[in-house]
Amino acid sequence: MTNDQGPPAESVFRIRPGRRSGRFRRAPLVLTAVLVAAVAAALYFGSRKADSPAIQAVRPPGDAPPAAAPALIVRRESVSRGATLASTLKKHGFTDLEVHNLKESVKPVYDLGRILAGHEFRLAFAPDGPWRSLEYDIDEEHYLRVTNAAGVPAAEVKAFPIEVGTALVWGRIQETLIAAVDELGEEDWLALRLAELFGWDIDFNTDLQPGDTFKVLFEKKSLEGRFRGYGDIIAAEFRNDGRTFRAFRYTYPDTKATDFFDERGNSLRREFLRSPLKFGYRVTSRFSSRRLHPIRKVYRAHYGVDYGAPLGYPVQATADGEVKEAGTNGAAGRMIRIRHANAYETLYLHLSRVTVRPGQRVKGGDVIGTVGSSGESTGPHLDYRIISHGRYINPLGWTFKPVEPLRKEFAEVYQRVVAGGLFLLEAPLGVGAGLTPTGLF
C-alpha cells in the first residue's frame, strides 16, 4: 500500500544504540539525525494540515447528566486450528440457532464460514447477558464489525486506523543481505524487497562482497503503536564492490503508475533480472565451452549456470515473456522455456515442480517453478540458460539494456523527488556503524 502523505510534523529520528566505531560520538549523530529529519520532512514530504477544532455539546442548565451506560464485558478469542464459527462462538454461550442466524445475516457482507486460524474475534456482552457486538480480524488492514441491536445483526467491513510513517536504516554486508537486515531489527521482507529492487543490476547470489553497504528509506505501518507491516520503499542506495546504485520511487500523476528510477531518470529495470533465484545460493557451475559432465564423465560444453539451492526453492522468470514449453524434456528433466522480446529465450532445467503452462504470459519476478533434481542430475540445483538470436550466451557475462526511462514531461517534478531522497541517502548518518535510525515514525 502506497501512502504519499508525509510523516506527522512531530516525527523525529530515534537512534537505537548498537555497535559503533570509537572514532565517532553519539551526540553529533543524534543532532545530525534530528536536522536531517527536520529538513527532509519539509523538503521531501511536505506538511500536514491541522485538524479542525472539536465541537462540544452544551447541556442546558439544570439538566442532570445522563446515566452512564453499564460497561460492556469484552472477550477475545483467537481462532484455533480446525475450529469453525460454531465451535468458536459456543464457548461464549451462543446457541446453534444464534450462530446460524448470525452467519446468514452477515453473509451479504462477509462469509463467516471462511474464518482463519490465528485470527481474532472480539465479543462484547451486556452485563445481563445478550451480546452487543462482534468483531473479526479479516486481514492486517480490515475487520468485520457486527452490531446486535434488538436481536437484528448489522454488519460492515471496516479498515483499521493504520498509521503509515517512514523509517531510514543502513547496514553493512558481512555474510548475506537477510542477515544484515535482521541485525538492524527489521524483518526479512525488507531484504527481499531490496533484492527485487536492485536485482536487475546485482546478482545477490554471486555479486555480494563483505563490506557492501546499503541505505533504505521505507514506509512502516503501525496500529496503536504496534508494528503492522511495511509499506513500500521510497528511496534506497546499494554500494556493491565499488559500484553505487540508487533508486527513487515515483508515481506518475496522470496514470498513477509507480516505478523506480535512478537519479538521472533511468529505469532500474533491465531486459532481464540478473538471477532466477532471489539470493542466498551459490553458483556451483558456470557457463563453459568444456566441462566434465558429472554423470557421463566426458568433457562437453555447459551452456548454462548452475545454482545450488534446496529442493523446492522458488524459481522466478527473469523477464516478461510467453511460456513455450513446460514439462519433462529428457536429460533436462522438468524444464520451462520462455520466449521474450528481442529474440531472447530462457530455459530453467531440472525442476521439481512446474507451476506454469504453455501459452501463459509471465512477468519478470513471477514464480514459475521450484528447484529440483529431475533428469540427469546429481543433486538439487537449477540449470539456467539464455538464448539470444538462436545461440547460447553467458547469463553472468551479458549486459542487458534498461527499459523505458522516466517520461520527459515529468523530469522537473521528479528531480525534486530525487533532491529530497538524496539529502537523506547522502547524509553522513551511516558513519557510526551499528547505530540505527528508526524515526520519521
Image (spheres, rainbow, N blue to C red):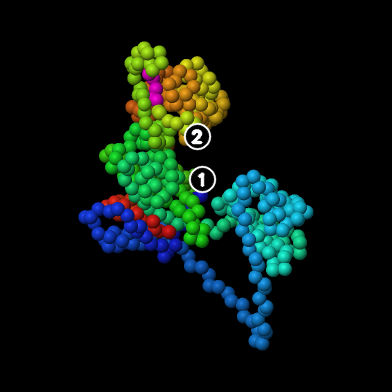
- Residue 301 in percent (x, y) is at 36, 16
Residue at numbered disc 1: 255
Which three-letter amino acid code belongs to the residue tagged 2?
A: Asp
Within the image, what quadrant is residue 54 found in? bottom right
- Residue 182 in percent (x, y) is at 39, 47
Residue 222 visible, this angle:
yes
Q: Report the predominant secondary structure element of the magenta stretch.
A: strand
> Mark 1 touching mark 2, by CB under 8 A?
no
Residue lying furthest bottom in this view?
62
* In the depicted structure, whether residue 399 falls above or below residue 289: below
Residue 408 visible, this angle:
no
* Residue at the image position 55 percent from the left and 29 percent from the top: 355
Within the image, what quadrant is residue 26 found in? bottom left
* In the depicted structure, whether residue 329 falls above or below residue 6: above
The number of numbered badges drawn on the structure is 2
Residue lying furthest left in this view?
23
Q: CA distance from mark 1 to mark 2?
A: 24 Å
Q: Earlier in the sequence, mark 1 or mark 2?
A: 1
* Residue at the image position 56 percent from the left and 53 percent from the top: 141
The circle on residue 412 is none
* In the depicted structure, whether residue 410 falls above or below residue 318: below
Q: Out of 13 and 341, give the one closest to the viewer.
A: 13
Which three-letter amino acid code belongs to the residue tagged 1?
A: Thr
Magenta-colored span? 300-306
* Residue at the image position 37 percent from the left and 34 percent from the top: 205
Q: Out of 440 and 322, give the one closest to the viewer.
A: 440
Residue at numbered disc 2: 366
